[in-house]
Image (cartoon, rainbow, N blue to C red):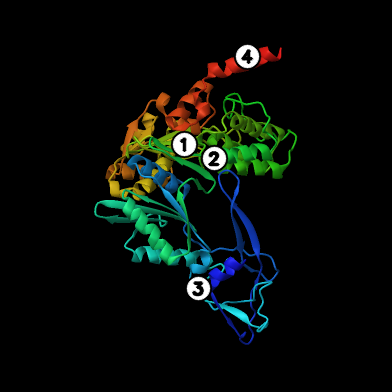
Amino acid sequence: MHEELENFERNHVWDLVEPPPNCRPIGTKWVFKNKRGEDGMVVRNKARLPKVSSKEGIDYEETFVPVARLEAIRILVAFAASKGFKLQQMDVKSAFPNGFIEDEVYVRQPPGFESARFPDRVYKLRKALYGLKQAPRAWYARLKSFLLKSRFVMGSVDKTLFLLSRGGDTLIVQIYVDDIIFGGSSHALVSSFAEQMSREFEMSLMGELQFFLGLQIKQGLEGTFVHQAKYTRDILKKFNMGDSKPMTTPMSTNMALDADEDGEAVDQKEFRGMIGSFLYLTATRPDIQFAVCLCAHYEASPRTSHRQAVKRIFRYLKFTPKLGLWYSSGSSLSLRGFSDADHVGCRIDRKSTSGTCQLLGTSLVSWSSRKQASVALSTTEAEYVAAASCCSQLLWIKATLSDFGLRIPLLVDFTSAISVAKNPILRSRTKHIDVRFHFLRDHYEKGDIELIHVVSANQLADIFTKPLEFDAFMRLRGELGVEGVDNALTKGEIESQWTGLIALLV
């Protein structure tokens, strides 16, 4: 608490003044939090003094402020691994009080630290305070201004990405509120930036990037491994699935989920909690993306059959708790995209499912499994819509990598969808396709993308559209770069282990 108030004094956050006429000062309240590392141990004690609302409840309203997308972080990790430099991390102490505010705001003196000499006075804010709606944007504006004055160039699409080039060397900085990831090809440039930031702000340098937004990151000479093994163990324990029987795939190919209106209803709060936990885990586990998204369709009215499907995912996580994404140092920087669709796959509304994934060399940086907005009247239309979605994401990634001048090949496994994109003549079976999806053809004609047919056996996006048999699932999972110690097990070895265990029990 003393450290927080001393930081306010050093940063000249406020001034103790006589309250002006008709002044209604905002209340404050102490909030305490323990920050934990990847091993779950407490690494820092935090005391924050946010403003509170008139109802004496903490008001965490925030205005718009750019934050790094997970895709952007994965792209940075993949790029750093391919270039052979390690990423560093730093944390800004009390970041928000560094941002200037334009409004006239008064707050009461902190509880337990009231002035004995001037108990009736209030603080007039010069800078932002935690809980103010302006605080996140004020901090971002301050940090952005400092970096631009330091000759950094802001990304054209990603406004949390800043780059500095000097003498053939490049320094990259990625911002997520008060957490900063940075790295570059020159050790001197990296050290200079760390010292420069420490002079401008009060920082806690954490050194090599190891734990960020719940992601565990291991950087080595051969590449970087990103996983959420600790989080996986935590959710298995939270939902009492730690002793469940392991399964080799997240969803059975025989499972056909529907509304199951005659089925027994289950606890909706618990079901939503499970789905929410899975959605966060998909940041490094694309192998469960389709199963999780399919189960999420039934959050409004979950039944026993839906809960069994969710338990199947837990049992798969029990079998593969240490899987994650591998970014090889030998990967190229060529950008590829795969798109696929499962025509009329939904049993309720007969809508198709789009599956897409984008790779930087061999490094998977983005993926999605999403039900299409309207019913596709043909397989061609479903594949075409999926390809348009993949193209949109590829163009965003291309914009963030514009300095490399990459030409994008987009791999589609249905020849008629490619024909529609390449042929400007509308035919009877394609004239009803929404105009917004024809931007795929537009970008092909401009030369922004290249459309290449890939046989279905090599279609990586297939794993995001439907349940797969064990062999196909394992093959695609490995080609996507999802690896770990459990990846060495084959189906035969798994069956052998279970047979041996049963024989031992008998």
Residue holding disc 3:
101
**Does residue 134 sit above or below 367 in this rendering?**
below
Circle 1: residue type: Leu
Q: Residue at x 39, y 30 (%)?
A: 414
C-alpha distance separating marks 3 and 4? 67 Å
Query: Is there CB contact under 8 Å for labels 3 and 1?
Result: no
Q: Between residues 182 and 198, which one lies in front from this camera angle?
A: 198
C-alpha distance separating marks 4 and 2? 30 Å
Mark 1 surroundings: few (<14), some (14-19) or many (≥20) residues within 10 A: many
Q: Position of residue 462 (x, y in %)?
A: 47, 30
Query: Is there CB contact under 8 Å for labels 4 and 1?
Result: no
Q: Nearer the viewer, mark 3 or mark 4?
A: 4
Q: Residue at x 65, y 16 (%)?
A: 501
Residue holding disc 4:
499
Query: Is there CB contact under 8 Å for labels 1 and 2?
Result: no
Q: Residue at x 67, y 29 (%)?
A: 244
Q: Position of residue 392 (x, y in %)?
A: 40, 45
Query: Is there CB contact under 8 Å for labels 3 and 4?
Result: no
Work out whether mark 3 precedes mark 4 in sequence or the reverse, and give the earlier one: 3
C-alpha distance separating marks 3 and 1? 41 Å
Q: Between residues 24 and 453, which one lies in front from this camera angle?
A: 24
Q: Position of residue 288 (x, y in %)?
A: 55, 34
C-alpha distance separating marks 1 and 2? 10 Å
Circle 2: residue type: Gln
